[in-house]
């Protein structure tokens, strides 16, 4: 016989699932009513057949890839160096990671526009400025993922062992530390991708044809197509989460081989 605690646990779990899935189901059913009198995928056909949809999606995807690569190039060596050489700086960096949550994006983008709209750094018309803004937004997620990955290993011990075996610092980092961060980097990459694909403020203020402004424009002018876009965005987010889980499980099965192979 199930205890009352288990019954209540299942009750609240079911209530939470209903609270989450009922609006999603309602949105999906509404998106199928584009054609009067019958259920159809006409709204999805209209969205996917719009050239602006593909153009904005590909643009945001390219910006997401650029943000991931630039963010990793900036954050991974920095966080690694702090863990290895300057652990007392961790509280300072952790405080800095909270700033994108405290400072509104509209303030950040106005600061970027004011700083980079006049010589000698006229970057306001360059996609590099948009990527720089996205890196700021993704900074907390990239830092937390990398920090968690580094906390799960003995960075100092691994580096000292590699250096004592004759490896230089770069070889030890790329051969020992980085392979053990694959799971953390994948999580950070998919989170960053989801953030960039739905971002609105930076793209609007910097006048770039990104996916977020496209969704806002469709939501302003049409009725059923925004619901189809919402379902697509939700599917894209959950696909990213599923890929994180699948790739994490696959990499975890081979994790035991990463450190010995890197330290050889």
Image (tube, helix red, strand yellow):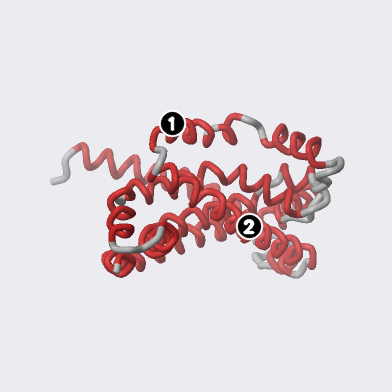
* Mark 1, residue position: 91
- Please tell me whether mark 1 sits on a helix, a strand or a loop: helix
Q: How crowded is mark 1: few (under 14 residues within 10 Å), some or many (20 or more)?
A: few
The mark that comes first in sequence, 2 or 1, is 2
Percent of width and height locating residue 34: 72, 61
Rendered image: mark on residue 32: none
Please state, as top left, top right, bottom left or bottom right, where the C terminus lies in the image.
bottom left
Identify the residue at horizontal 37%, vertical 49% (top origin): 150
The one of 43 and 103 positioned closer to us in this rendering: 103
Percent of width and height locating residue 8: 27, 38
Report how far apart the C-alphas of labels 2 and 1 lie in the structure. 28 Å
The one of 229 and 27 positioned closer to us in this rendering: 229
Q: Residues within 10 Å of mark 2 (few under 14, many from 20)?
A: many
Percent of width and height locating residue 149: 38, 51
* Mark 2, residue position: 64
The answer to whether mark 2 and mark 1 are in CB contact below 8 A is: no
- Please tell me whether mark 2 sits on a helix, a strand or a loop: helix
Identify the residue at horizontal 81%, vertical 46% (top origin): 124
The one of 232 and 18 positioned closer to us in this rendering: 232
Q: Which residue lies furthest to the right in this view?
A: 118
Percent of width and height locating residue 210: 74, 55
Q: How many marks?
A: 2
* Figure check: 200 above or below 67: above
The label nearer to you, 2 versus 1, is 1
Q: Answer left or right for 170 relative to 108.
A: left
Identify the residue at horizontal 72%, vertical 57% (top origin): 225
Identify the residue at horizontal 44%, vertical 34% (top origin): 89
- Answer whether residue 245 is visible to the viewer in this image: no
Q: Quadrant of residue 182?
A: bottom left
Q: Answer left or right for 98 relative to 112.
A: left
């Amino acid at each position: 016989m199930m205890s009352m605690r288990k019954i209540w646990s299942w009750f609240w779990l079911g209530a939470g699932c209903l609270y989450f899935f009922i609006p999603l189901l309602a949105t999906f059913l509404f998106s199928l009513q584009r054609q009067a009198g019958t259920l159809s995928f006409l709204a999805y056909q209209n969205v996917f057949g719009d050239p602006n949809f593909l153009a904005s999606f590909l643009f945001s995807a390219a910006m997401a890839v650029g943000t991931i690569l630039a963010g990793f190039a900036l954050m991974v060596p920095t966080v690694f160096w702090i863990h290895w050489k300057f652990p007392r700086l961790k509280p300072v960096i952790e405080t800095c990671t909270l700033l994108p949550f405290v400072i509104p994006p509209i303030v950040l983008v106005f600061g970027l526009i004011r700083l980079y709209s006049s010589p000698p750094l006229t970057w306001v018309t360059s996609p590099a400025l948009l990527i720089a803004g996205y890196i700021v937004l993704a900074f907390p997620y990239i830092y937390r993922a990398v920090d968690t990955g580094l906390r799960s290993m003995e960075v100092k011990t691994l580096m000292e062992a590699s250096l004592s075996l004759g490896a230089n610092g770069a070889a030890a980092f790329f051969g020992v530390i980085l392979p053990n961060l694959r799971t953390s980097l994948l999580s950070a990459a998919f989170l960053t991708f989801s953030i960039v694909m739905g971002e609105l403020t930076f793209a609007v203020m910097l006048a770039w044809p990104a996916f977020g402004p496209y969704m806002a424009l469709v939501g302003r002018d049409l009725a059923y197509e925004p619901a189809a876009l919402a379902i697509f965005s939700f599917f894209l987010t959950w696909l990213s989460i599923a890929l994180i889980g699948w790739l994490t499980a696959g990499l975890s099965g081979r994790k035991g081989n990463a450190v010995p192979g890197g330290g050889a």
